[in-house]
Amino acid sequence: MSDTPIAPPHALDMPDAAAAVYDFILAFALPPIAPERVIRGFENRYSLPAGNDDYILYSLAEQTRHGTNVTRFTPPADDAPEGILSKSKLVEDLVHIDFHGDADIAAQRAAALEIAARDALGVDFFKPYGLSVLYADAIEDKSFFNAEKQFVRRLRLNIHLTRTVTLSARAQYFERVAMSRVENVDAHHPPVRS
């Protein structure tokens, strides 16, 4: 242990929102969609599925920090000299989920995920991942014409999630101080005027 009271950080606990959203899509999309047709956006070297436009693209679009740090100290077990000092922040993630393909199927999948995200179903689903679902926005029509001048059907659902990100470090700890002399500073050491 160094002479400093706090050692460099040794752990960062950051729930994986992308993995949780992927699993959420596979669990609640109706009609079901094959896992290889659920694609994370903003990733290099991922090509869209060949053969048809039936796929779901999801992206972690934005992060917003809420509040200030929360500090916690966990005392050491037994007579260990160090405890754990943790600093946490609350982060809101905005997730875009884009449903491509047949108009009716895309609308059904978007509606199923919207209902689940706005209900205890979504809350219960995301809890084991260390996430909370706040709400889902209304489904938006983001259809467009592609480079080949073909109409591409796309519906978007925005889901708002929160997660707590925690940085931990070992910190020296004590419970008692043994003092040999306690004195009133002003009485024993009066101020001197110059």
Image: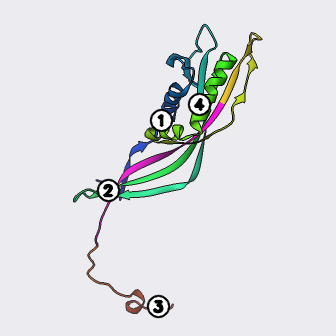
Which residue corresponds to the image point at 41% horizontal and 57% vertical from the top-left?
72
What's the magenta region?
157-176
Q: Disc 2 residue type? A: Gly
The disc, 2 or 3, on the residue closer to the chain's N-terminal end is: 2
Residue 141 in the image, given as x and y percentages of width and height: 73, 27
Colour option used: rainbow
Q: Disc 1 residue type? A: Asp
Q: CA distance from mark 1 to mark 4?
A: 19 Å
Q: CA distance from mark 2 to mark 3?
A: 43 Å
Mark 1 vs mark 2: in front: 1
Q: Disc 3 residue type? A: Val
Vertical placement of residue 32 versus 121, above or below: above
The disc, 4 or 3, on the residue closer to the chain's N-terminal end is: 4
Vertical placement of residue 68 versus 157, above or below: below
Q: CA distance from mark 2 to mark 4?
A: 43 Å
Q: Disc 4 residue type? A: Leu
Dot 2 and dot 4 residues touching (CB under 8 Å):
no
Q: Main secondary structure of the magenta part?
A: strand
Front-lying residue, 139 or 164: 139
Vertical placement of residue 33 versus 117, above or below: above
Residue 75, image quadrant: bottom left
The reply to whether residue 80 is visible in this rendering is yes
Residue 144 in the image, given as x and y percentages of width and height: 75, 20
Dot 1 and dot 2 residues touching (CB under 8 Å):
no
Question: Disc 1 designates what residue?
Answer: 16
Q: CA distance from mark 1 to mark 3?
A: 62 Å
Q: Residue 167 colored magenta?
A: yes
Question: Disc 2 designates what residue?
Answer: 83
Question: Disc 3 designates what residue?
Answer: 192
Mark 2, secondary structure of its residue: strand
